[in-house]
Image (cartoon, grey):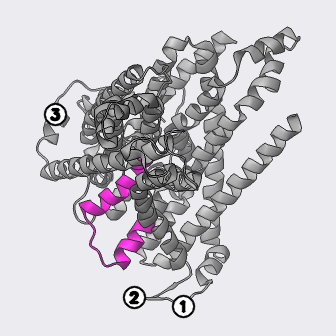
Amino acid sequence: MSDGNRGPGFGRSEAAQGYLLVATPLAYALLLLAAPLGAILLFSFWSQDYLTIDTTLTLKNYREALSDPLYRQLLLRSLLISAAVTAATVLAAFPIAYYVSFHVAPSRKAMWIFLITIPFWTSYLIRVFLWKVILGYNGVFNTTLLGLGIIDEPLTFILYNANAVVITLAHAYAPFAILPIFVALEKIDRSLHEASQDLGEGYLSTFWRVTLPLAMPGVVAAVLIVFIPTIGDYVTPVLVGGPDGRMIANMIQTQFLRLNNAPMGAALAVLTMAMVTVVALVFVFLNRRYLRGRE
Amino acid sequence: MKRPLRVYAILYLCFLYAPIALLPVFAFNDGTVIAFPLKGFTWDWFRQLAGIPALHAAVLNSLKIAVISAILATCLGVLAARAATRFAFPGKKGVMGLIMLPLVLPEIIVAVSLLVVLLQLGLSLGAWTVILGHVLIATPFAIAILNSAFQGLDRSLEEVAVDLGETKWSSFRLVTLPLVMPGIISSLLIAFTISLDEFIIAFFLTGTEPTLPVYLWGQMRFPQRLPVIMALGTILVLASVLLLAIAEYARRRGAARTGQKEAGGFL
């Protein structure tokens, strides 16, 4: 850090050089992210008056969103589906991350992580669509089970409902859950395990009292990185959700592109973000208390 | 505990790959219904792909958008990653937090907020508006990759170059840039893949010329188009895997060049 004033080109202070470099990406993020998000917030307090937008500030959209059972149900369902996806994804991901971190030879870890991430990089649309093909009434799953004589008629509870949305999203977000947990597990000092076992703890209690608390930051990151984006998923509910699997993003899209009621769509978008933020903060808070309680 | 965990890991990988594994199976299946048992082998669906002009236009549009987005996102990524790894400045956490925000923000929020602003400003939608959105969501990935490339850099190499009479810029160009080049290539490929696959932002901002995913979305409503979609999907998946393998190779070579230990994987 001592090269602040070295040589002809190093005249500027370190902070100034940092700002100079970060200025362009920051300006981009301010103009195309912060400003549009601000615009959405502003829009949500306006109202649509048939073809024109009434720019007097009002809470009308929020009142409507929170009192109309249709919107309320969609918001609540999105939250529940998102929570179910998060729980399923993170619980299924933990053993994988644990296996790769603790039981795979160091030289082969990169290959495992690469294998896990590949499906994530293939077209999201195609992957979701494939689940529709798999789970459908005449789909791969049903025709195979029928062909094998395991069932007599196609199963119908697996497509066009919330179950299908949860399965599909849990599949889509798997690497997002595995990677942060894996990174947290990798950071754990292996001698702690030996110490714990030398002191007479068994395999399970070592896991419960040493590994899990130390892996918690990774689990929290995994929960947030799955929970926040899934609540706004649009493609999966449309393709595999059916009427009972619709989520709030579908309504936001309808408001903006079909009903031409941007202010209402903006209010729903703001409410969704607010809901996600509150749940995320509560989760982080509870986790802090859990970890402190263990000290 | 090792044995059951291993079995679980392998089952999990099967779950991850099951949908993709079905793609080639049905892309070559000589039947319009996507179900077992298979009917026979055919190249027909791939041949049909060659005869759809709308598809070709969408592919070209997507490629154009992906190339430009990848270059812009990587340029922004280099600037931000260099600033984040090399300099300390007040408010760094907040600044980087804002730039990385699209990583966790639901894409539909990014899409509608951009749409509202563009329409309010009276701008017309088109390929360039999709590029604006794609650069926004690809930049955080570029930064994540480039951060690790810049972090592995030995700072004294640059200082030596300056001491030997190079200017700051020429030492960056002659010393730093070659060392982080694999990271840059990896970032370009990842940003390209993200843009090529992205649907929601393109769906909202594309205007009259659809990108490949938007075109695909339109086709998914027609059951008779299913096998053709499977064929197209097979090609897309192969292309993605190829790009990723190159990106991973570049990243590893970069890690080896700067003497880093293998850290494993993107993100």
Q: In this view, does A10 lie above or below A46?
A: above
Identify which residue is drawn at 66% across, 11% down. B2
Residue bounds of the magenta highlight: B111-140
In which image quadrant can residue A31 be found?
bottom left
Amino acid identity at mark 3: Asp
Looking at the picture, tell me which residue is in the foreground, A160 or B187.
Answer: B187
Q: Position of residue A278 (x, y in %)?
A: 70, 59
Does the magenta-highlighted stretch encompass residue B119?
yes
Q: Residues within 10 Å of mark 2 (few under 14, many from 20)?
A: few
Helix, strand or loop for disc 3: helix
Chain of residue at mark 1: A
Amino acid identity at mark 2: Leu
Q: Where is residue B101 in the image (x, y as percent from the top left)?
A: 52, 53
Q: Name the residue under label 1.
A: A56
Q: Name the residue under label 3.
A: B44
Q: How crowded is mark 3: few (under 14 residues within 10 Å), some or many (20 or more)?
A: some
Check chain identity for marks 1 and 2: say if they share one. yes
How far apart marks 1 and 3 lie (CA) works out to 59 Å
Residue A51 circle label: 2
